[in-house]
Amino acid sequence: MKIAIASGKGGTGKTFVSTNLFRAFKDLGYSTLLVDADVECPNTLLFFELKKVDDTIIKEYRPIIHPDKCLYCDLCADYCEYNAIFYIPELKQIKLLPNLCHGCKACSVACQYGAIEDSDTQIGVVSTFIDKSKNMFFEGRLKEGSVSTVPVIKSTILQASKQLSEIILIDSPPGTSCPFIQTSIRTDFILLVTEPTPYGLSDLRQAILTLDTMNKNYGVIINRAGLGDMSLYDYLSDNNIPILGEIPFSKEIARIYTQGNLVYDCMEDMNLLFKELTKKIINYGNSLS
Amino acid sequence: MEIAFLSGKGGTGKSSICSAFISLANNVVAVDSDVDAANLYLIFSANNITQTNYISGKNAIINTDKCIKCGLCKTLCQFDAINIIEGDYQIDPISCDGCAICYRKCPREAIDMVHSDESKLYVGGFKYGLLIYGRLAPGEENSGKFISVIRDLAHKKAKEKSIDKIIIDGPPGIGCPFMSTITGVDKVVIVTEASKSAFLDLKRALEVAREYLKQIYVILNKYDLNNEVSNEIQLYCDKLNIPIVAKIPFDKEIVYAMVNKQTIIEYNKDSIIVGILKEAYEYIINK
């Protein structure tokens, strides 16, 4: 079963939930993989002592334009839907604006004069790690300055999915657009982590709207319960959305987290809470099959 | 002067701090460029809002009646968006990037490009000036381009109204929306917090931002959550010569202010945080 831990709003505790949930699934005897698909800001694996065993470079198509072969016919610039070809025929100027290029290869299909050479560029890397007990972890990492978030996410999930594992936990990127969608669509269940504040609710709503249009199954975990107001609870009950767990607001939890430790190992009530959560998710998974 | 607030890691307090700066700036064009999770409008209720549809992109659709199943579109597509479902070629709208190569090359003209214009752009007045924000329709892409459209509009409006300050509440992450937000701004403020994960993301955000501009400032929020990490962040910024313009203690009042739909400055003007923020604001504006 592939589970995405996602949120809409950033900083609601996705990584906190993923890391502790991973430990809980392992404790209950499930083969479990932890995947960090927040490729713009990966930091899930900070919480474990790991050894890197593999780096796979992720590449994307980028054309190389040869001005000496170009007849300035205009077709490649016309084909490019992203305005990534800077083109002034009067000055015999043509070049690629790499940050606008989506790697669709349309320019290469367009050019009849061999002025566009097919090539690729590194956009990120997917790393595989193991811990002392040979558990596997995956992390996708967007190259600094690259904007091709989605292809790196796809490759990360693809690579992890090659492993046989009962549970694959995917720590997702924040937001509700492409990176969130491309992660969610590749999973069986989405665990949405939110907080009871106006910001948390507003972004959760947007995430749920998106998941509904995709016909995806999801449940909600409320983090920092007790901190904000009741509007989140009203919204969830009005829409019959299940609350799978509530993590109380506590400075102690925050402190343990900032030190890079897991509350599952340090706090008894949190240990119980995460074990309960795994059971709810497994029951849900069984109800599907 | 255009100032963007970013963070790398989400949830460091970017919007709360940014909204406080907006209330200090007064007479300002406030922009929310976190188009898939916009929040500023919750704090600043705008009036006389005008709403326009934004064409976020195009998607290809196959007309199965005309399709001769030659498979050329599937070969050309770089986004794995074309699948054969029950014998028919179909395009998955979520994977489709709108590059139109299938549309251009289909030998039977069986493919159409359709615009998606469900995304909305909002402009309204509010007590400190003008508020501009976008809302990407569920499932829409191209947020980077949307952000540049929003920022162009902000520039135009600022000029029209002779407002000299634009303050942007940016998105989390360091990818396309981040790049779109920092391109061409005068100053960037990165809001981080004292946690190992936020520090890691701060490093990545700084690495990208430093390629593009010089005036970068850091605000260290919740610095007392972990003094050790706070010190590491301080040392790191010192080394790069990037000023930490404010160290803000962890304080529930920031959340209470948000729940009350106020900035921290409106919520409790005597809070020590307000003093710290005012000093930081002066520093960023003047240096």
Image (tube, coloured by chain):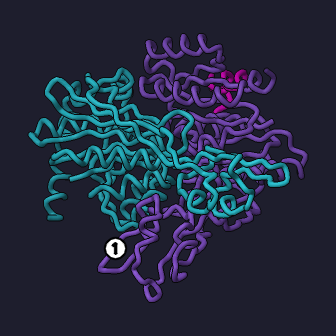
For the magenta stretch, what is the residue range? B267-280
Residue at x-position 29% and y-position 79%: B86
By secondary structure, the bulk of the magenta-drawn segment is best described as helix
Residue A96 appears left or right of B254: right
Among the 4 quarters of the image, the one containing residue B103: bottom right
Q: Which residue is found at the position 19% from the left and 58% from the top?
A: A284
Q: Residue at x 59, y 30 (%)?
A: B208
Mark 1 residue element: strand
Q: Which residue is mark 1?
A: B84
Image quadrant where residue A247 sits: top left
Indicate the amino acid at tag 1.
Answer: Ile
Which tint is chain B?
Answer: purple
**On-image quarter of the C terminus of chain A:** bottom left
Magenta-drawn stretch contains A35: no
Up-down relation of residue B222 to residue B43 (above or below): above
Give the letter of the chain under mark 1.
B
Above or below B45: residue B180: above
Residue B277 within the segment the image draws in magenta = yes
Give the farthest residue toward the bottom. Answer: B65
Is residue A213 visible in this depiction of the protein? no
B261 sits to left or right of B127 = left
Q: Nearer the viewer, residue B80 or A211?
A: B80
Residue A163: x and y in percent read 19, 44
Q: Position of residue A129 (x, y in %)?
A: 26, 30
Q: Horizontal placement of B5 versus A149: left or right?
A: right
Q: Give me the chain that's cyan.
A: A
Q: Nearer the viewer, residue A75 or A269?
A: A75
